[in-house]
Image: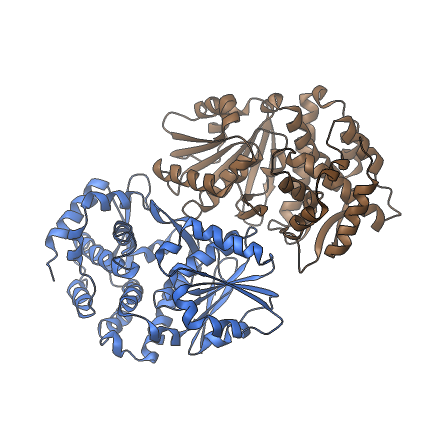
Chain colours: A brown, B blue
Amino acid sequence: MAELPIHTKDTSYKVFIGEGLCSKVGSLLPKQYNQVFIITDSHVANLYLNEVVASFSSNVTVSTYTVPAGENSKQMDWFHECHTFAIESGLERSDLIVALGGGVVGDLAGFVAATYMRGIDYIQVPTTILAHDSSVGGKVAINHPQGKNMIGSFHQPKAVIYDTETLATLSHTEWRSGMAEVIKHALIADHEMLEQCLELPSFDSISNATLADLLKKGIQVKAAIVREDEKEKGVRRYLNLGHTLGHAIEAESGYSSITHGEAVAIGIDFALFLSNKQFPEATLPIDAYRKWLEKHHYPMSSKLKEYSIEALMEKIKNDKKNDRQQIRMVLLSSVGEPTLASYTEKALMDELIEFRSEVRDT
Amino acid sequence: MAELPIHTKDTSYKVFIGEGLCSKVGSLLPKQYNQVFIITDSHVANLYLNEVVASFSSNVTVSTYTVPAGENSKQMDWFHECHTFAIESGLERSDLIVALGGGVVGDLAGFVAATYMRGIDYIQVPTTILAHDSSVGGKVAINHPQGKNMIGSFHQPKAVIYDTETLATLSHTEWRSGMAEVIKHALIADHEMLEQCLELPSFDSISNATLADLLKKGIQVKAAIVREDEKEKGVRRYLNLGHTLGHAIEAESGYSSITHGEAVAIGIDFALFLSNKQFPEATLPIDAYRKWLEKHHYPMSSKLKEYSIEALMEKIKNDKKNDRQQIRMVLLSSVGEPTLASYTEKALMDELIEFRSEVRDT
């Protein structure tokens, strides 16, 4: 089991990474809690809920609440239902919420914890590769029909307990979704981690040890940035590489036909396209990145042809990261060197049209 | 115009108190904002919205959203509507929300600000006496059908701009509601402020200067406590004097037939009753307090006979301030000396029954 420390201005906590940790959740907590409220989804509940419940000693009151699997559970109605059930379970300020599942459950349960009685403790028990990203750093939220993660807050967990055995049951789609955030961290971080990603064999045949190593590295990239800028006033924005267009694609697809990571993967491709124009001297790994997407059967950027540019731009305009009509994009001046660039709506739309016409069909 | 500084661990801001400040809101902001989103209610909008809107210079984009007057607007649906309208108005992370109104608007708009894009700046422009309490200290929330302020967070405003002229239009009910929090601050603070409260003539005939002086003192009591304990882990709990029973009465009355302060006034009477039993040596001003309630036409504690003790206890049990089945009550060991006492459900119910049978009809 590996332990990574996460530091923010006000708090510190540990990320535990290892095999079989679902059965140790109760003993890895930073302090004793009288009552625990586990929020999970219908898919994860079948696989790991019993094991996590059994990890608590008999003098801890454990209640559980299961939302339907899928992005649609990150909605106001489910948020309200979680609060109702927590009140009915007698959950108190000094108790603990456990987020057991992928990014959707983590964001939802974290936001419930951030707002229940004005904030109680919670821990993340991620069960997807994607959640190596979302479970660390305290960004929690639900979606608004008009934008992803529009309603939320910053609320750091008391621990992240990452059982890599849970990753064995992930679908190919979930692998792709998660590995997009891994390669994003590599692009932000350094050539070495990027090479490691680009050389990966088919996701099916990645060893547990390699995966655990990549997740650790990804979390370390994030931890270093969050330490410097918890509230996303500065360098934390770099973590949004690929996310401006990615979020728009997700929203346009109704959060169903394409996963978060798959959408971000296209967004990264666009960011590399823009970076190449802004920094023509940089030798960005555009071809290698596109080959990697193809090798691992990602929806390619040609998928953009399925969407209306105007509709995508409408979503992009509403993005949280904008400032005064300028759309703020994360670019790379080289691998490991993220930077911010501002575009007017018109300029970005022109770029998006050019990008879409350039990308070849697969 | 008076200026009171408020300090918390992470931030500082000013409370401005004076006449005619509604027309100066735009010029009292701690920094420039490009866009401002004013949330108010239907009652206050008619009286002061135009004046506040006009206080901003023409290069600031101002949008407004009006919720129905009354406690029922502190609900999830209105919270969601505020977010929708903010998104549609193009409100960005670097913009400002203005809470223009009483405690309901302040709590609702503050919670919208706390969660819009994970938190943006807001200011409080209170228009009731009650809001001298709620607008300072950063506690924001909406109600859950099963409990008041159950869903919320701590989010400090960037300024509180308190125009005492707005208090001239308050109804008798609102005077009573607000003055209950003023006398609560006096009971927590010292004999001198308490004497000043007890000697007040009919609320109709209080001078502006006396009222401004009492509000300043009330805010100073609160500021000193919030500085020491922003997140209500310790001494901030003292500010809940009268609120445990008060919240239960409000909830049982459906937030309609009795105001917050009127319910708290009965709660304070009960707290004095309990304090007198715990500290028989203390000479608590129980009779003087009850005379004061009667003089100012408060609903007296005999009103408790309208409620089921079991139903009140059910609400009290769900209170946020409890810990492990013990119900935590704020008592006074003497005026200016608040303290915490824990009761089992059974013990508190017995006390409540005794209290109810003791209080005489008016």
Seen from this angle, which residue lies furthest right? A281
* Apparent side of residue B79 relative to residue B315 in the rendered image (left or right): right
Q: Quadrant of the C terminus of chain B?
A: bottom left
Q: Give the answer, above or below, for where B173 lies relative to A220.
A: below
Count the labels in the image.
Answer: 0
Where residue B183 appears, x then y in whole percent?
28, 66
Residue drawn at x 57%, y 55% as measured from the top left: B88
Residue A334 in view: no
How far from the left and from the top, in percent, is residue B215?
A: 35, 71
Say above or below: B196 vs A243.
below
Taking A12 as reference, is B67 left or right?
left
Q: Position of residue B260 (x, y in %)?
A: 30, 58
Residue B128 placed where, x, y %? 36, 68
Q: Residue at x 72, y 19 (%)?
A: A205
Viewer-nearest residue: A232 or B225: A232
Depth check: B193 or A68 in front? A68
A220 vs B45, nearest the viewer: B45
Q: Residue furthest top?
A: A205
Q: Is residue A100 visible?
A: yes
Q: Quadrant of the N terminus of chain B?
A: bottom left
